[in-house]
Amino acid sequence: MNTNWRAVGIGFVVMLVVGAFGLWLPVVGQIGAGLVGGFVAGYLAGGVGNGAWNGLVAGSISGIAVSVLAALLGGLIGLTGGPLGGLLGGAGVFLVGVVITLLFAVDSAIGGAIGGLFNR
């Protein structure tokens, strides 16, 4: 499996754009963003294996980016809640970040495999 960074980058941008519009449908919109972005990355990479891999990488990167934004929000919560707020905010951000990254990566890999299937 080869990483096509152009496909990963384009898939990442597609995930961000679709995810921004998907905020109006909280769960469905984010899962849809991962599927669409993974599909684009997989289609550009070509092949089922390469498509799944490139979709997985694009989804993981977008999950990490969203986790960083969540960490900033958790830091703000920590500032307002004192030491206990900082502890709870940090632990919560870590767990949410892991779940977000896994969610984005798994559905992006599925979308990438389907996209790669269309471009053999």
Image: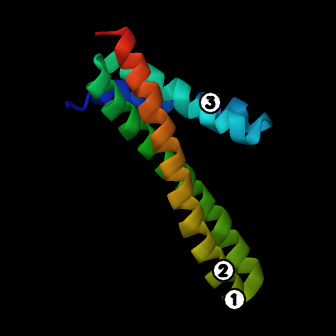
Residue under label 2 = 88
* Disc nearest the viewer among 2 and 3: 3
Q: Classify 10 Å Cα crowding around label 2: few (below 14), some (14-19), many (20 and above).
A: some
User: Is 105 positioned to the left or the right of 57 in the image?
Assistant: right
Report the residue at 34% width, 9% height from top: 119
Q: Position of residue 28 (x, y in %)?
A: 70, 35
Q: Picture quarter containing residue 112?
A: top left
Q: Tag 3: residue type?
A: Gly
Q: Classify 10 Å Cα crowding around label 3: few (below 14), some (14-19), many (20 and above).
A: many
Report the residue at 77% width, 79% height from top: 80
Q: Picture quarter containing residue 32?
A: top right
Residue under label 3 = 32
Q: Tag 1: residue type?
A: Leu
Toward the right, the furthest residue is 24
Q: Are marks 1 and 2 in contact (CB under 8 Å)?
A: yes
Report the residue at 66% width, 80% height from top: 88
Q: SS class of the residue under badge 3?
A: helix
Toward the left, the furthest residue is 2
Q: Spatial distance from mark 1 to mark 2, Cα to Cα?
A: 6 Å
Residue under label 1 = 84
Q: Quadrant of the N terminus?
A: top left
Q: Spatial distance from mark 1 to mark 3, Cα to Cα?
A: 36 Å
User: Is 113 positioned to the left or the right of 94 in the image?
Assistant: left
Q: SS class of the residue under badge 2?
A: helix
Q: Quadrant of the C terminus?
A: top left
In this rendering, does residue 34 appear at all? Answer: yes
Q: Is residue 62 above or below residue 71?
A: above
Q: Is residue 12 above or below residue 113?
A: below
Report the residue at 35% width, 18% height from top: 116
In this rendering, does residue 43 appear at all? Answer: no
Q: Position of residue 99 (x, y in %)?
A: 55, 56
Q: Picture quarter containing residue 55?
A: top left
